[in-house]
Image: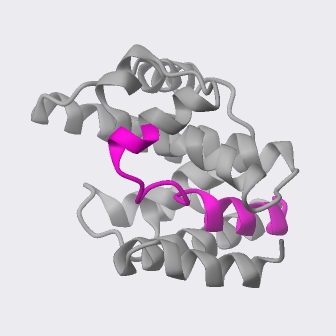
Amino acid sequence: MKRVEIEKKLKKELDKERYEHTMGVMYTAAALAMAHNGDLEQALYAGLLHDCAKCIPNHEKLKICKKHKIAISPSEGRNPFLLHAKLGAYFAKKRYGVKDKDVLHAIQVHTTGEPGMNMLDKILYIADYIEPNRTKAPDLADVRKIAFEDLDKAMLKILSDTLDYLNERGGELDPMTMKAYKYFKRL
């Protein structure tokens, strides 16, 4: 499916704020891909489809994952909103015809991160955090600057800030986020 067709479909399926966020992530991912010699088309598709399953109610996310045998970690079972990443990768493939394994993988890991992320994975993860509609994250101006200089440093900063935020709020930490943090800290 062509990008323009996907945009039209998503505009109907997502709420206004989520659609604006999606477009912001798509263009930010494209800018990061250009800055770091990444694949522009992959970045555009990953950004466009990263939240395609976000507006589905949590109980439905669980049901759809079980129906299609999409693995649910204990953390995701307790926090089904996290499933939008895995489900998004599934929908990108089945509903939107994406065959590119790198694009699907980037969508799948854009919420928790993981050790050994490739360039597209990092670009999408970072773009989701720094896109222009985001305003509440700590040190956002610094993170945006770092993102265009060094993807690994930007990953470490975002993961560190995410861990601090979850610790302060008492939110549950997905173990994969901690693994990703430790990986980027070692780099």
**Does 178 appear above or below 13?**
above
Which quadrant of the figure has residue 1?
bottom right
Q: Residue at x 74, y 84 (%)?
A: 4
Query: Can residue 28 be seen by looking at this rendering?
Result: yes
On screen, residue 125 versus residue 134, left or right, reads right
Q: Confirm whether the magenta stretch covers residue 54.
A: yes
**Does 87 appear above or below 147?**
above
In the image, 51 versus 23, the foreground residue is 51
Colour pattern of the rendering: one colour
Query: Can residue 157 be seen by looking at this rendering?
Result: no
Q: How many marks?
A: 0
Image location (x, y in percent) of residue 80: 36, 35
On screen, residue 12 versus residue 90, left or right, reads left
In the image, 147 versus 162, the foreground residue is 162
Image location (x, y in percent) of residue 82: 41, 38
Look at the image and tell me in which quarter the C terminus lies: top right
Q: Residue at x 21, y 39 (%)?
A: 165
Q: Residue at x 54, y 32 (%)?
A: 65
Q: Residue at x 70, y 71 (%)?
A: 30
Image location (x, y in percent) of residue 143: 42, 57
**Does 16 appear above or below 31?**
below
Image location (x, y in percent) of residue 86: 58, 38
**Does 25 appear above or below 138?**
below
Tell me the magenta residue range: 38-61
Residue sticking out furthest to the left: 169
Which quadrant of the figure has residue 108?
top right
Q: Confirm whether the magenta stretch covers residue 11.
A: no
